Amino acid sequence: MAAIEMKNIVKEYGDGFKAVNDVSIDVKDGEFMILVGPSGCGKSTLLRMIVGLEDITSGDMVIGGDRVNDKAPRDRNLAMVFQNYALYPHLTVYENIAFPLRLSKQFGEQEIDEKVRKASSILELDDHLERKPGNLSGGQRQRVAMGRAIVRDAQAFLFDEPLSNLDAKLRGQMRTEISRLQRRLGITTVYVTHDQTEAMTLGDRVAVLKRGLLQQLATPRELYEHPVNLFVAGFIGSPPMNFLPATVKGDELELPFGTVTLPKEKAERGRDRGLLIAGIRPEHFDDAQVVDKDKLGAGSTFNATVEVVEWLGNESYAYIPFEAPPEVQAQLEQLEKDLDGESLRTQLVVSLEGASTIKEGDEAEIFVESSKIHLFDPETGDNLTVGL
Amino acid sequence: MRAKLGPSTIIGMIAILVWCLLPVVWIIMLSFKPEAETAAGSPQFLPKDWSWENYQSVLQDDLFQRALINSFGISLIATVLSVMIATLTAYAVARLEFKGKRVVLSIALAIAMFPVVSLVGPLFDMWRAVGLYDTWLGLIIPYMSFTLPLAIWTLTAFFREIPWEMEQAAQVDGATSWQAFRKVIVPLAAPGVFTAAILTFFFAWNDFVFGISLTSTTNARPVPAALAFFVGPDQFNPPTSTLSAAAVVVTIPIIIIVLIFQRKIVAGLTSGAVKG
């Protein structure tokens, strides 16, 4: 087990394109680190540079105190689970798991057998040891791939989108399984995913990447509550954060639907800066009719016509369209593109409590928790209210 | 889903089988007839007296034994060398980026398209000059150069099918490039390797033109060429039944090889390697 330090890592291709640009991340011993971002953000490239399948253009990759930039993959002693598992189809499950042990030549037949059986019992593969990968289900193949990783005493585990090939139910189960396994073995882990749910639930810390640049490196809670810019704010959370054109006048925040009173320190940061983008998560809205009386004081209310309501039982989502001025519109479209999405109409997504009776077409009084509002600079995308 | 066989399909299949196999059966029948029976006018289909006499005389024939040894030796060596070189070349072509990759492939294809006959003359002269005439090596070299292109093309296609991740996984698991190649890639490409091997062996085993032009004695003369020199006691009456027996004998190894390797060729390529 070892810590992994990435110092100013750059990956530049022959055509000058920088897939990874000056990224520094330190993964502590035993930590579960997530690399997350939309496709093309360089997360997989970074992982492949850690394991040695991709050359490093510049920067230092330090694993367990050794600089490994020039070491071959086999000399780095890392275990990796590939997106498509990359099991050896001509070998049985047993031989697949034993493969790295046989290559290392330092174990006797009996020792290998012990280790393989231990790994297979952890992953509940005992019944399948003599089968070939071709006869296994997706979840079982996934477990064999993990078996091949845990059977050796690797310095760290690397996962490259391991769950993206599984169906939704199995994905949830395997996610818990991976988390449990990592806690149990206490081994340093770097995990690449494009799924923000996986990032939030699995990671001790999460590194959000966009077009090769590290955006923010923080715990899931911090990413959620204090995103440093528009991109992180839009990427983390489902349904995503709402972005509205806004201007601050005194302590008041002018939104398309009405005016909201901001806490003093937040208002100060956005005062006299012209048009801003306000970010508000859906759950920080609610139906004013069902909000506790004492909570109402901590925010403001406004009236709006609800276009669509999706009722999910414990809560419902209401959609309220609005018009955005062109400056903000352009920025929001760019953001959608960065997030792999498509820019549709500008609309507000509001999460309502299950008890709310608002129906489609209703003119409703909506409550917003003004202390949870973020303000973003529309030019740079920076969060102006970071730390508040 | 299996299509139901209608009567017309069955009739068609029988017709094709008869068309293809009749000459073979005819040869087999001839080989069981005594010498006299084949020489007398137009012989009937089934032998009057079944006899192993022809086989005994062929197998005891010293010239034929020598030819069999030559054929086996030359074909096997040519096959092994050709497949080994082709495997390494194809792997490089499929996996590595290097200058002149297209040139290698085009030249290989160009060689395969050369008519064999046009090379026999120059080769005959060259081999006599360098002392390769009438030796095993003198036949192995042309066989290899004619079978390598096909083997390289076949294997390249197979290697391209194997996902890169297989090798990368092996490397991460602690394998050197050579170990990854030998323990993961070659077993996965086995169907391709066997296909290439069989094609090479057939070419070498069945070749007549090189065999008869580049040899002069039993030193290196392979079976197809040796059969041409098979003369019975009377040179105006070719020993038809003995020749038939010899033809049957040389066909048997080919059939055995096809039967053995057929399963390997049919076996799936990378089923289960990746989620499909």
Image (cartoon, coloured by chain):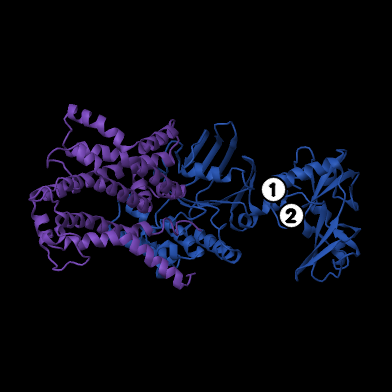
Chain colours: A blue, B purple
The mark tally for this picture is 2
Circles 1 and 2: CB distance less than 8 Å?
Answer: yes
Rendered position, B183 above or below A379: below
Asked if labels 1 and 2 share a chain, the reply is yes
Q: What chain letter is assigned to the residue under label 2? A: A
Estimate the x, y position of residue A324 in percent, counting from the top left.
Answer: 86, 47
Which residue is at 13% across, 53% downward?
A: B239
Label 2, on which residue?
A240
Estimate the x, y position of residue B18 in percent, counting from the top left.
Answer: 33, 64
Residue A270 in view in this figure = no
Q: Amino acid at mark 2?
A: Pro
Q: Earlier in the sequence, mark 1 or mark 2?
A: 2
Label 1, on which residue?
A339
Estimate the x, y position of residue B226 in percent, counting from the top left.
Answer: 16, 46
Q: What chain letter is assigned to the residue under label 1? A: A
Please give left or right for residue A25 compared with residue A90 in the image.
right
